[in-house]
């Protein structure tokens, strides 16, 4: 049993509605940020294009990597609860400049993921609208619509947000699971030996596929942004972090195996498919489910946008309290008890790059991939730094045990290797520019940190 004295759940609520979310609603925040419905529809085909018959293996390895990180984050969450997510953990342990790196990286990660799913939303919306009416709508208009709805819900009430996200994802995932089960039943009681033997898979393809598979998990820790609003947060948040990564990993791995299997059955390439779940639903004999999954993916992207704005606003709120953002962002709505100004700003920040790219004529799937990859840099850096900080944090709480460094350092190493997989070999086209965009953004954040630090205490800034 851990000493009670080490529990450091803060009594500071930062103006948020305290302990209002149930364990399931807290879990919904992490699950919705991951937007699991979009992985079978959009991400798994991209992984398959790289890893081929090793797609399921890429997701199995990604699950192990994320579970290592989840275990480290849950250890932090077991002793501390705050709206600032991983930034709060960094602020308690790391030097100020590394705290700033985690804060700005995490903010970019949530906002960038929001931009990514907004791009996915207007792609799927126009697919459905074209099939239904024969016409497509303005991508910018659709992006503005989904962002506006998400801002309004996040502005109003976090409990409404959590309940809505929970039902949206539960319904969408249930339909996908039904299709997968029907497909496996049609296959019969035997394994797909081409997948089990990794036929045609290459080492470089698996490595690149593994990096892309990690994108399916990003945001699994976002329940930690609800530290002030979750009931019994020192128990519910660690459980939500581990459960979201474990359930997500199982779901993604089974879907990866089933999708590759289904396309083997019809002699087609999953990596080239634009509507994989529709094909699988037809193979499973439930063609109508393909349409339902596409609708579910669209609604899941709405839930993902909402979850990202919810998480980003709370990170920005704590950054303002810690002097990394403007003081006005510390304020919360007097009646709704939400970080209203931060919600509006993070929502607009998520929309702007999507609107620019949409006006240029870039497809929603391109926006989904580009902004998602940019967000991944922020997540990986934040995960690695927080994992590396865990041993020092446990020592301060007097709960450190010999050998406790192995897991955090292994998790941090895995994230560093994942980052290296993003950088080398150098990606082609727009993906090759993303590391430089991230570095420019991070440099600007550190300069802002130094300016704010110097303005408040010149002597401290020089130390």
Image: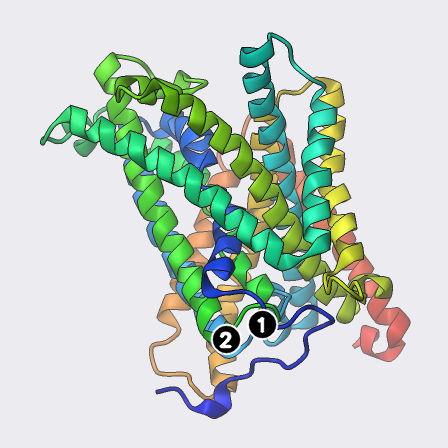
- Residue 234 lies, with reference to residue 251, above or below; the image says below
414 or 105: which is nearer to us?
A: 105
Residue at image point 33% right, 53% down: 64
Q: Earlier in the sequence, mark 2 or mark 1?
A: 1
What label sits on residue 232 in the rendered view? 2
Residue 40, horizontal then vertical, whole percent? 40, 32
Any part of residue 218 in sight: no
Residue 152, horizontal then vertical, whole percent? 73, 46
Distance Cα–Cα, label 2 vs label 1: 7 Å
The quadrant the N terminus occupies is bottom left
**In what element is the residue under mark 1?**
loop
Residue at image point 55% right, 83% down: 8
Residue at image point 17% right, 24% down: 186
288 or 281: which is nearer to us?
A: 288
- Residue 460 lies, with reference to residue 246, above or below; the image says below
- Left of 186 or right of it: where is 118? right
Residue 295, horizontal then vertical, whole percent? 50, 28
**Mark 1 — residue?**
19
- Left of 46 or right of it: where is 156? right
The number of callouts visible is: 2
Badge 2: how crowded within 10 Å, few (<14), some, or many (20+)? some
- Left of 461 or right of it: where is 426? left
Question: Toward which corner of the image does residue 293 lie, by quadrant?
Answer: top left
The quadrant the C terminus occupies is bottom right
Residue 423, horizontal then vertical, whole percent? 53, 39
Badge 1: how crowded within 10 Å, few (<14), some, or many (20+)? some
Any part of residue 80 in sight: yes
**Do residues under tags 2 and 1 come within 8 Å of each other at their CB atoms?**
yes
Instruction: State the scheme by which the image is colored.
Output: rainbow
Residue at image point 63% right, 60% down: 102
Q: Residue furthest left?
A: 189
């Amino acid at each position: 049993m851990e000493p009670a004295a080490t529990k450091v759940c803060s009594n500071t609520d930062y103006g948020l509605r305290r302990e209002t979310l149930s364990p399931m609603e807290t879990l919904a925040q992490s699950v919705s940020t991951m937007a699991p419905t979009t992985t079978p529809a959009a991400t798994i085909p991209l992984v398959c294009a790289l890893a081929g018959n090793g797609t399921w293996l890429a997701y199995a390895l990604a699950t192990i990597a994320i579970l290592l990180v989840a275990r480290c984050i849950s250890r932090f969450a077991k002793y501390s609860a705050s709206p600032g997510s991983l930034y709060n953990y960094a602020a308690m342990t790391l030097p100020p400049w590394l705290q700033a790196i985690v804060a700005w990286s995490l903010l970019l990660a949530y906002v960038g993921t929001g931009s990514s799913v907004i791009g996915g939303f207007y792609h799927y919306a126009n697919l459905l609208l074209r099939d239904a009416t024969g016409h497509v709508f303005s991508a910018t208009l659709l992006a503005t619509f989904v962002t506006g709805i998400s801002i309004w819900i996040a502005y109003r009430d976090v409990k409404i947000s959590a309940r809505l996200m929970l039902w949206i994802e539960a319904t969408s995932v249930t339909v996908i699971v039904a299709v997968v089960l029907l497909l496996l039943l049609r296959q019969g009681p035997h394994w797909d030996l081409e997948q089990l033997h990794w036929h045609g898979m290459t080492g470089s393809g698996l490595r690149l596929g593994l990096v892309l598979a990690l994108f399916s998990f990003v945001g699994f820790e976002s329940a930690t942004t609800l530290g002030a609003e979750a009931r019994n947060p020192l128990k519910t948040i660690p459980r939500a972090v581990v459960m979201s990564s474990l359930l997500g990993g199982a779901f993604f791995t089974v879907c990866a195996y089933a999708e590759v299997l289904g396309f083997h059955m019809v002699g087609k390439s999953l990596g080239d498919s634009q509507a994989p779940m529709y094909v699988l639903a037809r193979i499973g004999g439930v063609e109508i489910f393909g349409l339902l999954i596409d609708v579910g993916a669209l609604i899941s992207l709405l839930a993902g946008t909402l979850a990202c704005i919810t998480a980003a606003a709370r990170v920005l709120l704590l950054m303002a309290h810690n002097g990394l953002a403007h003081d006005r962002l510390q304020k919360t709505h007097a009646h709704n008890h939400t970080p209203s100004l931060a919600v509006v700003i993070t929502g607009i920040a998520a929309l702007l790059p999507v609107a620019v790219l949409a006006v240029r004529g870039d497809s929603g799937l391109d926006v989904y991939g580009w902004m998602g990859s940019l967000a991944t840099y922020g997540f990986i850096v934040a995960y690695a730094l927080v994992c590396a900080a865990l041993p020092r944090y446990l020592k301060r709480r007097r709960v450190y045990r010999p050998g406790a460094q192995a897991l955090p350092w292994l998790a941090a190493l895995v994230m560093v290797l994942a980052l290296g997989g993003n950088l080398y070999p150098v990606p082609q086209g727009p993906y090759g520019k993303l590391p430089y965009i991230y570095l420019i953004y991070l440099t600007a954040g550190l300069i802002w940190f130094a300016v704010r630090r110097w303005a408040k205490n010149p002597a401290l800034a020089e130390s």
